[in-house]
Image (cartoon, rainbow, N blue to C red):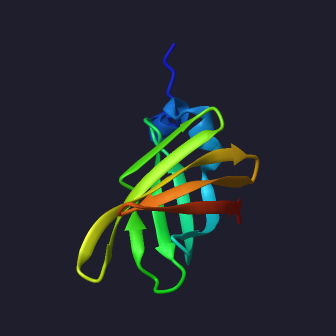
Amino acid sequence: MKYSLPGLVLLPGLFLASPAAAQLAGPWVVAGSISGTPFTVNCQFQPKTAGFGGICIDAANGKTHVLSQGDAAGNHVQWSYPAHFMMMSFTVNFSGTLNGDHMAGTVSASGRTGAFSATRK
């Protein structure tokens, strides 16, 4: 007897992604401030075999930031992406707690810190 599993071949990442990363899948609106400067980014997270990836788009100027790192374990999440401002390059780092369709935590960039909250769209 011969069996074929074509559907499994197309979706291997979904079976290997962590449950925490799978909970993040989809669109999120992330808002906060760093050193008193407010920001809003629209992020689209997708689970990967190790952690999660995706993009965040700056609501003010439309700049797209590809995640360079994304990890989730239990209800703790963290992600980073490279950014540029006035000829300066830096990494924006988020670290927070996932609670259903909401997240909250800290954000840091170029030695400055702040807070963020996020809501699933």
Query: What residue is at 66 percent from the left and 54 percent from the top?
Result: 104
Rendering quarter of residue 42: bottom right
Query: What residue is at 54 percent from the left and 39 percent from the top?
Result: 72
Q: Residue 40: image x %, image y %?
A: 58, 75
Q: Among all residues in the image, which is located at the extreme bottom?
A: 61
Q: Is residue 86 above or below residue 57?
A: below
Rendering quarter of residue 50: top left
Q: Nearer the viewer, residue 60 or 108?
A: 108
Q: Among all residues in the image, which is located at the extreme right?
A: 100
Q: Among all residues in the image, which is located at the extreme left?
A: 87
Instruction: State the quadrant of the C terminus.
Output: bottom right
Q: Is residue 55 above or below residue 2?
A: below
Query: What residue is at 49 percent from the left and 73 percent from the top?
Result: 57
Query: What residue is at 66 percent from the left and 61 percent from the top?
Result: 118
Q: How many marks?
A: 0
Q: Is residue 90 left or right of residue 10?
A: left
Q: Residue 12: image x %, image y %?
A: 47, 35
Q: Residue 87: image x %, image y %?
A: 23, 80
Q: Residue 94: image x %, image y %?
A: 50, 54
